[in-house]
Amino acid sequence: MAETEETLKRIQAHKGVVATMVVNAEGIPIRTTLDNSTTVHYAGLLHQLTMKARSTVRDIDPQNDLTFLRIRSKKHEIMVAPDKEYLLIVIQNPSE
Amino acid sequence: MVGIGHPEIFPLVFTTRTQEIFNCRVDEDVTEENCFKLIKKDDIIQDLKTRAAISDFHPVKNIVLEYPGEELLIVFDANFQYGQNFYLVASEEAKENFLKPPETAEKMDSEEEKEETPEVCAYKPPVSKPWVSLGSEKEVEEESVKERVKKIKYMFSQGQRKFGAPISFTDRNASHVKDSYVECTSYQDKTFSIKVLEKHVGVQMVPKVREAGTQTQWTYPKNATTQYFPRQLSNEEKEEILSSEKLKQFLTSVCLRMEIALQQNEIMNAFSDDWKALEDDMSSPDGKSDICLKTYQTFTDLHYLKDKSISCICWHPTIYGIIAESATKQPSKEERTKLQHDSVIIFWSFFDPIHPQLILECLDDIYCFQFSPSDPNVIAGGCFSGQVVLWDISQYEEKLQNAKSVAVGMKKTVVNMNNVSVLSLLENDDMSELLFTEDDESDKGQILVRHCTSSSIHHSHEKRITDIHWLPDYFEVNRMGETFENRAGICVQLVTCSPDSLILFWDIRDTKLPTKHSSEKVKEENSFNMLPEVSDTSNDPDLIWKPLMKLSLCDSGEENNVKCSPTKISLQEQHYHYKITDKEQSLHKSQVHIKESPYAQMSISSKKTMNVLENISNNFFVGTEDGEIIYSDWEMKTSSNEEKIASNKYTIHKEAVNTVQRSPFFKDIILSVGGWNFAIWKEGVTNGPILQSNCTVQRYTAGHWSLTRPGVFYIATDDGNIDIWDLLKETHKPSHSQNISKSAITCISPRVASPKQQFLAVSDDSGVLHVLEIRRTLSHPSSNEQANILNYFEKRVQCLKNLKKDQEFEIRENGNGAGDTDGTNN
């Protein structure tokens, strides 16, 4: 428990990080630094997108798998690290 | 010719000749009733002989000749019963029947009529009567077929001997043997063939009808809704997952990639567009339009602003689009009437350029005013008479905010916010017609708001107040000039200066009445959330608003202390309400919901618990009427000595200084404008201004720093031009000059309304307020501009130092004299 906390805190402490979220395989948030409604919003959308991205990668080459997903927008960058059961989502403001 | 069914009747046609001969003329001798005529046989025969073929009796000649009797009956057939108009009865018996039976029939009819009573006829069985032949045997005979010819009989028989002999019968095909039989074959006889030309055929069309049935299932439409909410894990589940081993493994595996990505972002922005970044640095080429300031709106009012000059403009700090201006009599007009009831501050809104939103009234012409930074509903103004006046417009805050929706057709109301008791203290009787004692709003006139407090006239300035500022909310000053921490957190103190050489510090809390009936009244009137009740403090002996601290500036270096006459003052700790940061903007938004003015909770503070603030500097710059810039401080050495000797005095401007302003970006850079030139000073540099402009043809009437660009400021001239100076471009002339109005400009005030929109309000001598929109290049600072400007100023300071050194060197070299030139910059 303490290790997970520490890891998450370390990630959160990076420069420009706006939010950090851990989401389970069904898109239900487990741990977040944002408010509930925003978290649920992000979790739902990004979970679906990650599933889609993963299926795309595997469709092209079944031996392959998705390791990281980065979405760069005008305001932030959303980074999703998927795993078998969980997703780690971090939103960062790129250096300006 | 045989009549049909009546063999003895023969229809005849009698011509008129015949009728004349036999006297059976129609309608004369023979009529319908009397239709029988007996004609002698001989006569007929005679006629036949004489006329032969043409005699009418010719067809019945034989019958007439054979007739047994003497007379023949001719009957007139009016009805053409037998086809002709007469008929001949050929037999005696028929004749008799004709002549008689009708009589019997007539008799019988008459007998029946006489009786008139129906009687049951007794059944008479038919009595057989002898057959009376009526001639039907002839017909029968004629029709019957009789054999006329006796038939010949032939009998064939075999000879005797063949009878009884044995016979053997054999078959024989008839068709095999030729001529074994005779036949009469049918043949088509052409003479009898009938060609069928027309045949009537009946056709009936019957539609083929088939009955069939289907059954569909139609479910009626129904509204259905679903509502879902996101699935969430309960806290226990979350805890459980967080402490699970799997999560730990997940995080350890995922953490590395995430950190790599994060660090990548931190190192550099891979998507930065260098080309775009370059564009910001480049200043706009002159090829673009020359107009940097676009006219956005112009406000003027015929009623209040006729022949008036606008002395001061202030933007409303929180509400977008509201700007206030104060109008004074034009300086050229010497005569000043006593009744200054139209000395006003007018509020304009962008959304209604014709009708002012609010009008604040005052006793005297207002030369300068300021919104309180803590509460934009409190406005402090300085009058011509030297008094400080306060207004509270919290009631109208909502109205100002809703200026958008009430742009046209605004209900003009006159509101009396005074108590009844105060009305007797009205100085000007003319005002009474405008103010009513009712609390209701009536549809007359415009909203006139009277000031709520004014300072005591005896204790105020002697001359007009030329500058008024609110002290920042983090410190306050006491009578000794010491700075203390401001507990209230709101701006409660003012500083004013006036050409009577006084700088006065005022405290708003002094205007609050001591606990008396008034405070109860204030509580009662819940609708008015304002400072103490309106009263003319000059008349009410209980309430006198005196300045907190007086400072008199004197000229040093002369025997009788000649007093300076400050016109503008700029404090070190100026409340930076110019710069709008994001934090402040959000603060402004939240302030919108604050109904209660922060001043309502104000109370006279006890001086015991105040903390002394050491780091507040009490220096200030003052510009005087004689064109001097004085740098001084308000520290009071002793309590009695109120005079302050101006230590640092610079004479740069030839005429009265009209602007002394600190840069919003640098605390120690001051712009001073006066006469025919302007100068930039740095606090601490005592040699002189670090930058001084050339003298120009036109007078400079006002100046203001730009709020967003550190190196840009606006200078206004007295022929209606605005010069925009950009220190990074050129320092010897304005980068841009634009003509705004025909008359002299009196005041400039820029405002950042939104990150994209910046306005510049310019007022002139003729009472017109122009609002211009600043082009983005002028409002948007280039990157590192602040650093560049800082560098520039540093260089200038250095330059000045060097110049001073050179001067000293020259003095030493030459002994005396040398230049008294300041760091003029060509």
Image (cartoon, coloured by chain):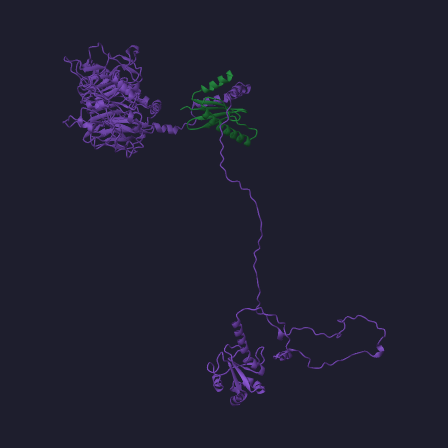
Quadrant of residue B662 within the rendered picture: top left
Which quadrant of the structure image shows residue B427?
top left
Left or right, B346 with respect to B198, comes to: left
Q: In this view, does B448 lie above or below B559?
A: below
Residue placed most toward the observer, B228 or B154: B154
- Decide: is B516 above or below B129: above
Chain A: colour as depicted = green
Chain in purple on the image: B
- Residue nearest the observer in this picture, B89 or B506: B89
**Along the horizontal axis of the image, is B752 left or right of A68?**
left
Q: Count every numbered label the image shows and give the total.
A: 0
> At x 37% / y 27%, what residue is drawn?
B277
Q: Where is residue B619 in the image (x, y as percent from the top left)?
A: 25, 15
Q: Can residue B153 be seen in this view?
A: yes
- Compare residues B477 and B291 and report the one nearer the observer: B477
Image location (x, y in percent) of residue B178: 75, 74
Q: In this view, does B555 lie to the left or right of B242?
A: left
Q: Position of residue B333 (x, y in %)?
A: 15, 28
Locate residue A15: give its quadrant: top left
Q: Where is residue B236 in the image (x, y as percent from the top left)?
A: 52, 20
Rendered position, B123 above or below B459: below
Can see residue B91?
A: no
